[in-house]
Amino acid sequence: MPFDEAHKGDPFHGDFPDPYGGEPPGPLAMAVQQEVDELLRLRFTPLARHQYLQQLKDRRVLSLGQRPGTPRDGVITPFDFLPATVGFDTLLVPGELLITRQSYDSGQGPAGLAEFGLAADEVSCPVLRDRVLRLVPTGPMGPQQLADAARALRGWGLDVSLCSITTLAGVVKPPPRKTSSGTSSGTSSGTAVQAAVEARTVPFAGGGPGRRAKVAVIDTGIAAEIRPDRWLAEVPRNGNIDPLDIFPLPHGDGVLDFAAGHGTFVAGLVQQVAPGADIAVYRAVDSDGIGSEVTVACAMIQAVIEDGAQIVNLSLGCQTQDNVPPVAIQAALEHIGEWASGNDRDVLIVAAAGNSGDTTPSWPAAFAPGGSPRVVSVAGLTPDLQPAPWSSRGYWVTCSTIGQGLRSTYVEGQDPPPPDGSGQVFGPDSWVLWSGTSFAAPQITGALARRYQDEEIPLPAALDGLLAAGLPVAGFGRAMKILPGI
């Protein structure tokens, strides 16, 4: 559909009406406001952040006296962090740095590494081994010592960084909320809210246009069970299953992990906006919201080069020491860009800007200003299209859309009891509300897929047209409304 000045900031005018019909704020709206207030408050409460991070670390310990669990399935990753007083802490994989192969081969690499007690080793991802190496300490080295070594080696001109932990656009994310008080199962199909959602989306369920955009969602994976309402039924599982309850290791505790269902929720948002899209979900972050940048980078390459994805959704990110680009993710982008150019393919990477409430770059979103493939960085707005105080922002943000109180598909299970969760129980057809730039990004992903399909235009043209339909907002790129929030 062509965009016009009359619908500036609302490119899909009329397609996604507000199911609440402009009703006065109620308990749900109050709960969502508490959720986003908590997102903003976290940057000023280091004690709460550090207690939560320590809890996440402890959940990876197999038993008393043992070291943190190894990444036995390629996803579960031990981590540590460099504490911050204001803002958010730098999360890292303990006991390793990353260096580009080109930098290592420059001649300064081996000599400099030996001086710092570091030895080169291969990364776990085979397709990155000709571009990236691990640097492993030959003796004990804590997080601050690793950070100091990385900074010193960069001072020598070596392309070295900590191995970053990518989290789901803010590792401390309040839990989702039911879309109504509903039944004890959490299913809200009998409520006015769910009826409005279904009325809007059922006409899309019969399939999409002849040409389908291939979308990759790199996240926690997807729920194994097919929902009775058939939402996301066509998404292949292929081993990319969100285990939902694996922590504390080794068997879980009978309640949903802290980021369980994130990938299912994100995929549901893409399907709401672009019901004809061919969606695949990849598990690269565990169900507590923690993942290594190497695992994410490897999944990016698999999704695009091996599986043919055209749009990659990354509702995750990391802040880094000295705002240095993460080596593995940068290498993945370079590999994808070279492959796309050599094969005349268009690829877009859509990344959440983060929930830090400041201008600190969050990667991979901060790659947005240039390069190939194009990275589209997405910040969050309030439901009235104002800049969300909790959202990251800056010159590197491409666009923004509503990130507060979004409704989407969720998983079956029980949320942890307070203070870690709400204690709510969710049934097999659950729809919930959740907030964060994690949920702004998949709307842009869906919008790009929809334009590509419906208008049969190339992806770069779909992006340029979408941005032209947005309203310029300083630090938030082009602002636009797609799905409603609360």
Image (cartoon, grey):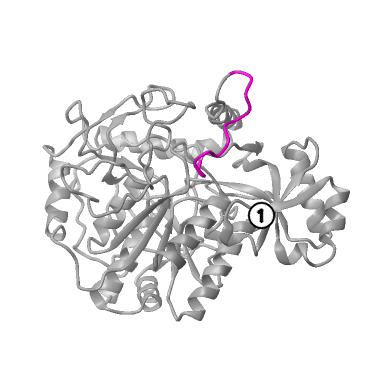
Query: Residue 406 at what x, y percent from top left?
Result: 31, 47
**Residue in the foreground of this view, choosing between 142 and 446:** 142
**Residue in the foreground of this view, choosing between 138 and 177:** 138
Magenta residues?
64-75
Residue at the top extreme of this rendering: 64
Query: Residue 249 at what x, y percent from top left?
Result: 49, 27
Query: Residue 440 at what x, y percent from top left?
Result: 38, 54
Is residue 121 rendered to the left or right of residue 413? right
User: In the rendered view of the protein, which quadrant contains the N terminus?
Assistant: bottom left
Q: Which residue is mark 1?
A: 323
Q: Is residue 15 above or below residue 293?
A: below
Q: Main secondary structure of the magenta part?
A: loop
Residue 401 makes an appearance in the image: no
Query: Residue 95 at what x, y percent from top left?
Result: 70, 40
User: In the rendered view of the protein, which quadrant contains the C terminus?
Assistant: top left
Is residue 215 rendered to the left or right of residue 419? left
Callout 1: SS = helix
Residue 426 position by quadrant: top left
